[in-house]
Amino acid sequence: MIKIKTRAEIELIRKSALLVSKTLGILAKEVKPGVTTLFLDKLAEEFIRDHGGIPGFLGLYDFPNTLCMSPNAQVVHGIPNDKPLLEGDIISIDCGVLMNGYYGDHAYTFEVGEVNEKTKKLLQITKESLYEGIRAFKIGNRVGDVGHAIQSYVENHDYGVVRELVGHGLGKKMHEDPQMPNFGRKGQGKKFKNGMVVAIEPMINLGTHKIQQLKDGWTILTKDRLPSAHFEHDVALVDGKPELLSTFKFIYDAMGIESNEENEFISNYNENQK
Ligand code: MG
Ligand code: MG
């Protein structure tokens, strides 16, 4: 069942999402060759707890850490370890926070040092496909419209859309209805309604869409071992339109990048409207 959120609930989800955004901003400064994913994991846990949150993934379905850290051919759900990141790696960092009873959940794929052009392009197109998906999260559309927007965008570039893992509703639970696949048909699936909050998260492979799972029971990786990218935002449907609750702003600030990519999804909500 899809849970419709009140404005007050949306603002609580925004608080949790923004703590994730700030955590990713802190990590952005530290992602470089030689750093271990376990070090980044500890940093994130400390930052989240210092700011009044609880790591949302730690212990969820028995996941052992604060961050899902998935380098290169790993798609998602990688477990932090003591192997240093290498020049030319990419690393998907997915982070969850629970605060005031509501979850935030978002992710960014970082470049470690200088990355080759093919992989850079994969990251760029995957991030753009996330915004294509968010644009389709509006009144009059259905779940399949978001999936279709993402799939058609990335398949134009011959990339593979992971089928087995999907986005999701978000709120008092990390994973709520509806499931939000990154593939689909226009006009199919559940209808969008104001007050829905979802995590949209394309997982896009340079080669085949097929995946495998490691024996650790968590790590998902591409079958052909080519790289995979993953970007995730938390989005509310307000007044018929998508409103971004998470932001990559803190990441871009850390990197010294100026970006206006989120501008079209920023709310005109303010304190007076409460
Ligand atoms: Mg998610
Ligand atoms: Mg996530």
Image (cartoon, helix red, strand yellow):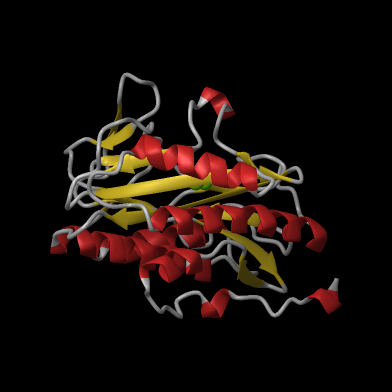
Q: In the image, residue 213 lies at what x, y percent? A: 32, 27
Q: Looking at the figure, which quarter contains the C terminus? A: bottom right
> Which residue is found at the position 74% from the left and 55% from the top?
12
Classify residue 264 as left or right of residue 236: left
**In the figure, residue 86 lies in which quadrant?**
top left
Q: Looking at the figure, which quarter contains the N terminus? A: top right
Q: In the image, residue 257 lies at what x, y percent? A: 37, 75
**In the figure, residue 109 lies in which quadrant?**
bottom left
Q: In the image, residue 220 lies at what x, y percent? A: 33, 33
Q: Would residue 129 be visible to someone looking at this image?
A: yes
In this view, the residue in front, 64 or 113, is 113
Tell me how many marks there are.
Answer: 0
> Which residue is found at the position 65% from the left and 60% from the top?
192
Q: Where 198 sits versus 35, above or below? A: below
Q: In the image, residue 216 lies at what x, y percent? A: 35, 20
In this view, the residue in front, 16 or 165, is 16
Q: Would residue 188 be visible to someone looking at this image?
A: no
Q: Where 261 sits versus 202, above or below? A: below
> Which residue is found at the position 36% from the left and 68% from the top?
255
In this view, the residue in front, 254 or 266, is 254
The outermost residue toward the top is 215
**In the figure, residue 126 lies in which quadrant?**
bottom left
In this view, the residue in front, 183 or 90, is 90
